[in-house]
Image (cartoon, rainbow, N blue to C red):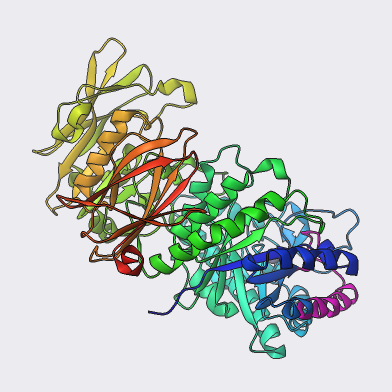
């Protein structure tokens, strides 16, 4: 197996390298932390504005060449340039930056960006070619293309509806639309082809821009490594997220998945970001081997985020299959006073991270798969009265089932043989055959997904239909079905009216086949039953389907709801779920396991403010030597007791927001 290396990379702000004084201070800082500096990347501008005149840019790149040489003399193995703006990120400093030299991005509503340009005009391409050639002439080991490579959120929400783009779309679709006509067509239910073609145009616009960047770089030096920074599908899939095509067009072998986790006010947000980065990693072509997590502390104020959070979020990202970290935390001056506590935490974490990356290499992430696709926006249905470009349609939010991970059910970024979670209207984007394939395995779904399946004529595979939609004064009572175990007769009350529209929160189900098991009954506040609220059914394809009609995605944190959902996950996956923590503690697991379950690496985060004094962890894998590793400590051997379906270990004294890595089998387990 090819050795997979951990890469720790540092992104350096322009003010930190532009003057000799600042640069000397920066070098001193990097030398002091040499053990965690594998790579550095120079930001080449300070604003997120597209345009810097080339006569300003050329001497800056000459200086960059000198700085890169200085890094190499300091023993840093890889030094490159991070091109912050290719299209421009947003409207910033527009009132005094030079005016845009090419067509600005035009929004669907006719608004015009003041900082970002359309990627399709010849003027833009000429400038971008010249700019990337100048970057390549600075002899960088690599060039990062930053994550302004998207067609959304460039100061205007949805781009680009400029005359050039509308003309391109006329060619693509065979019909000329004005901007207004096109936006109107997007909202017509049967105009799915127009929506799909528009997303295809977004993909193709970026693809050809990436090819242009690649050619400009390659013309100067074909050996320069190229990387592309990406954003998550949770934000939107408007741009199409065709990483296979974009990375190929750019010739990129480096990736930096990213997303927003800027502060630790809501620390569990780090889990959502790590999972998002895992999803982005899942889209990468296999030729991309260097996958660096975006550690993002912008705009670099110390009290926004603790060093513990920094280490935890990087650890979780490595758990989800990334093998490096690109730190954006050094701020804007080389004194770095705000950043020092974060920087100093990294050497402490490095040995554990190395161990994780080495031992988890090649092991897939295993767990329930909340279904999603980069084609979500392209393929989703638009119903009468809906707006395709309306902001954040709640039923198309792929992050909603993340709560299952937060209560301890291991989640995967791609299908892993443990069952699928169908949330909201995401099921719309799959073909009947794809849905049948899912329903032949394990599926956990809500009633909105049930409606989609019923419309497709697949409702019988769930064993139930949506009988009645209630929206006030309801709770659910657990039955004495074996899947509820000691949670039988539990009452779960989500107070559904308190959180806005309660539609979909009190959906009564009706069995339409024999053998449907009722797991909960919806009742009113005087214990009067209204009908089944959660059901389990084994269908004719051999699939096991659980439908949740009562408050499916909120307030799942009770001890007994968690127990029920653990049992349900084990049942739908036929005991393939890789890890289960017995005690009701806030341990968030991410599991990597070989297909034969002989080798595994499981990371557990204590996502709570209390220590976990004892946790019984069931690992569904073959018995083998077990080692446990914490950040900043020596690893130790751990006894494992064989049990039905796997082994059992006990973790003790996990500090709040502490991490444990558990290695089973393989070289690390034995060592
Ligand atoms: Zn345009």
From what the image shows, is residue 205 above or below residue 535? Answer: below
Residue 16 image offset from top left, x and y in percent: 82, 63
* 411 horizontally vs 309: left or right: left
181 and 166: which is toward the camera: 166
- Kindly indicate the quadrant of the structure image that contains residue 464: top left
* 178 horizontally vs 351: left or right: right
Q: Is residue 166 visible?
A: no
Quarter occupied by the C terminus: bottom left
Image point (19%, 45%), residue name: 571
224 and 74: which is toward the camera: 74
250 and 480: which is toward the camera: 480
**Stretch of the chain drawn in magenta:** 43-69
Q: How many marks?
A: 0
Residue 570 is covered by the magenta coloring: no
Residue 44 is covered by the magenta coloring: yes
* 18 horizontally vs 292: left or right: right
Q: Which residue lies furthest to the left in this view?
A: 514
574 and 381: which is toward the camera: 574
Residue 627 image offset from top left, x and y in percent: 35, 57
Residue 3 image offset from top left, x and y in percent: 44, 77
Quarter occupied by the N terminus: bottom left
Q: Quadrant of ligand 1?
A: bottom right
Residue 200 image offset from top left, x and y in percent: 52, 67
Q: Can residue 499 be seen in this view?
A: yes
């Amino acid at each position: 197996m090819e050795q997979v290396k951990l890469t720790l990379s540092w992104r350096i702000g322009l003010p930190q390298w532009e003057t000799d004084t600042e640069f000397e201070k920066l070098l001193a800082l990097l030398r002091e932390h040499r053990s965690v500096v594998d790579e550095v990347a120079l930001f080449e501008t300070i604003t997120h504005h597209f345009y810097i005149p080339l006569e300003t840019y050329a001497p800056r790149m000459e200086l960059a060449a000198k700085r890169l040489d200085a890094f190499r003399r300091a023993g840093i193995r890889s030094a490159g340039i991070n091109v912050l703006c290719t299209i421009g990120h947003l409207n910033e400093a527009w009132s005094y930056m030079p005016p845009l030299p090419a067509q600005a991005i035009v929004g669907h509503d006719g608004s015009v960006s003041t900082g970002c340009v359309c990627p399709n005009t010849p003027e833009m391409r000429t400038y971008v070619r010249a700019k990337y050639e100048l970057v390549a002439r600075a002899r960088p080991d690599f060039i990062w293309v930053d994550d302004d490579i998207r067609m959304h959120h460039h100061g205007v929400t949805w781009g680009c509806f400029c005359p050039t783009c509308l003309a391109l779309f006329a060619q693509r679709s065979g019909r000329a639309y004005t901007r207004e006509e096109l936006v109107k067509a997007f909202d017509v239910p049967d105009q799915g082809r127009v929506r799909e073609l528009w997303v295809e145009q977004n993909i193709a616009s970026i693809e050809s821009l990436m090819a242009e960047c690649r050619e400009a770089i390659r013309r100067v030096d074909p050996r320069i490594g190229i990387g592309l920074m990406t954003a998550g599908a949770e934000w939107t899939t408007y741009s199409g997220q065709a990483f296979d095509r974009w990375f190929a067009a750019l010739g990129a072998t480096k990736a930096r998945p990213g997303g927003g986790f800027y502060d630790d006010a809501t620390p569990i947000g780090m889990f959502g970001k790590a999972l998002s980065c895992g999803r982005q990693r899942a889209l990468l072509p296999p030729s991309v081997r260097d996958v660096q997590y975006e550690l993002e502390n912008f705009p670099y104020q110390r009290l926004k985020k603790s060093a513990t959070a920094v280490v935890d979020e990087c650890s979780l990202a490595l758990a989800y299959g990334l093998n490096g970290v690109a730190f954006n935390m050094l701020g804007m001056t080389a004194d770095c006073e705000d950043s020092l506590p974060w920087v100093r935490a990294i050497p402490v974490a490095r040995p554990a991270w190395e161990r994780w990356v080495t031992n988890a290499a090649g092991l897939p992430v295993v767990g329930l798969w909340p279904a999603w696709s980069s084609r979500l926006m392209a393929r989703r249905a638009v119903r009468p009265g809906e707006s395709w470009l309306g902001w954040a349609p709640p039923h198309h939010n792929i992050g909603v089932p993340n709560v299952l991970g937060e209560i301890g059910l291991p989640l995967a970024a791609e299908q892993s043989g443990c069952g699928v979670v169908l949330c909201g209207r995401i099921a719309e984007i799959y073909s009947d055959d794809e849905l049948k394939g899912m329903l032949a395995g394990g599926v956990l779904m809500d009633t909105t997904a049930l409606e989609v399946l019923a419309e497709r004529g697949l409702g019988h595979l769930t064993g139930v239909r949506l009988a009645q939609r209630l929206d006030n004064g309801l709770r659910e009572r657990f039955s004495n079905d074996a899947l509820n175990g000691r949670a039988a007769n539990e009452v779960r009350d989500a107070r559904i009216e308190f959180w806005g529209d309660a539609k979909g929160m009190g959906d009564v189900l009706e069995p339409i086949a024999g053998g449907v098991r009722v797991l909960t009954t919806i009742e009113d506040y005087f214990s009067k039953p209204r009908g089944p609220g959660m059901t389990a059914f084994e269908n004719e394809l051999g699939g096991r389907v659980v439908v949740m009609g009562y408050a499916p995605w909120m307030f799942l944190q009770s001890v007994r709801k968690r127990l029920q959902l653990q049992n349900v996950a084990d049942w739908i996956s036929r005991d393939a779920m890789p890890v289960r923590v017995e005690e009701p503690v806030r341990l968030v697991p991410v599991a990597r396991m070989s297909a034969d379950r002989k080798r595994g690496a499981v990371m557990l985060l204590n996502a709570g403010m209390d220590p976990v004094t004892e946790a019984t962890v069931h690992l569904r894998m073959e018995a083998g030597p077990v080692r446990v590793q914490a950040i900043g400590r020596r690893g130790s051997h751990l006894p494992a007791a064989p049990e039905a379906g796997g082994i059992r270990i006990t973790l003790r004294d996990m500090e709040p927001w502490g991490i444990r890595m558990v290695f089973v089998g393989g070289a690390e387990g034995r060592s």
